[in-house]
Every structure is written in structure tokens, then in C-alpha cells.
Image (cartoon, rainbow, N blue to C red):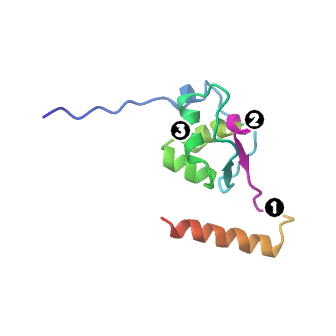
């Protein structure tokens, strides 16, 4: 019987090249859309992991799926947004109508039911 592999711990700042702040404001509930299937730019392994998980998921969901801290995911997502690979769908603001709020709640409930 082979021994179980040992877990390797990678510091979050190594995944983001030392950056701690995202260049784009990303609320945890913001839904993400992958814009393109092709990647024309060099991406880190972490950014590629995030990119594969981000279509129709929220920032928080992506963080959970890739098992990375949300701050790291926000930095990587901001890079992907700047490269034009990911788009952020509108979230609730002070000017959001009642119908838009209800639609977001219904979309969230549909997403939760799929789990």
C-alpha cells in the first residue's frame, strides 16, 4: 500500500504574485460570465482554475469550487476581467427596482436548488 500524499500549503500571495487588492470591485454575490472559450494570453495555473469555474457562478461560489480564499479569487478574477475573458453581471444597487431584486432572488434560489 502506498503512503497517502502529503498536503502542500501554498501561501495566497504566491498565487497572486504578491497582490492583495483586486483592481475591479467584485461583490461576493456578483455573477460571472465567461466571455470567450479561447485564451490568447498567458495565465497562471490559479487563474486558469478560476476561469474554468466562473461561468454563471458567483464570486463566492468560484472561491468555494477552486478551494481558494475569496481575496485571492477576487485578484485573479480582476485579471481575467481586464483580459476580457470574464464579464460581471449587474448586482443589486440602491437604484435596483423591485422586479430586478425579485429576479436576482429567484435566480439565486434556482442556483441553490441545483446543489
Secondary structure category for the residue under label 2: helix
Give coordinates of residue 57: x percent, y percent: 60, 54
What is the quadrant of residue 1 in the picture? top left
Residue at 64% across, 33% down: 39
Specify which label sits upstream in the sequence, 2 or 3. Answer: 3
Residue that mark 3 sits on: 49
Residue that mark 1 sits on: 93
Of labels 3 and 1, the one closer to you:
3
Give coordinates of residue 19: x percent, y percent: 65, 28
Q: Is residue 38 left or right of residue 2?
A: right
Magenta range: 79-93
What is the quadrant of residue 5 in the picture? top left
Q: Among all residues in the image, which is located at the extreme right?
A: 95
Q: Is residue 88 magenta?
A: yes
Alpha carbon distance from label 2 to label 3: 17 Å
Specify which label sits upstream in the sequence, 3 or 1. Answer: 3
Alpha carbon distance from label 2 to label 1: 23 Å
Q: Is residue 77 magenta?
A: no
Alpha carbon distance from label 3 to label 1: 29 Å
What is the quadrant of residue 109 in the picture? bottom right
Of labels 2 and 1, the one closer to you:
2
Residue that mark 2 sits on: 82
Give coordinates of residue 55: x percent, y percent: 62, 51
* Placement of 88 over or under 108, stated as above or below: above
Secondary structure category for the residue under label 3: helix
Pointer 2: residues within 10 angstroms few (<14), some, or many (20+)? few
Pointer 1: residues within 10 angstroms few (<14), some, or many (20+)? few
Amino acid at each position: 500500500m502506498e503512503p497517502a500524499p502529503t498536503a502542500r500549503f501554498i501561501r495566497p500571495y504566491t498565487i497572486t504574485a504578491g497582490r492583495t487588492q483586486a483592481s475591479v470591485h467584485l461583490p461576493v454575490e456578483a455573477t460571472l460570465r465567461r466571455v470567450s472559450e479561447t485564451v490568447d494570453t498567458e495565465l497562471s495555473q490559479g487563474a486558469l482554475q478560476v476561469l474554468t469555474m466562473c461561468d454563471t457562478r458567483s464570486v463566492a461560489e468560484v472561491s468555494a469550487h477552486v478551494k481558494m480564499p475569496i481575496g485571492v479569487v477576487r485578484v485573479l478574477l480582476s485579471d481575467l476581467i481586464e483580459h476580457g475573458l470574464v464579464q460581471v453581471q449587474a448586482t443589486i444597487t440602491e437604484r435596483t427596482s423591485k422586479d430586478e431584486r425579485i429576479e436576482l432572488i429567484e435566480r439565486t434560489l434556482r442556483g441553490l436548488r441545483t446543489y
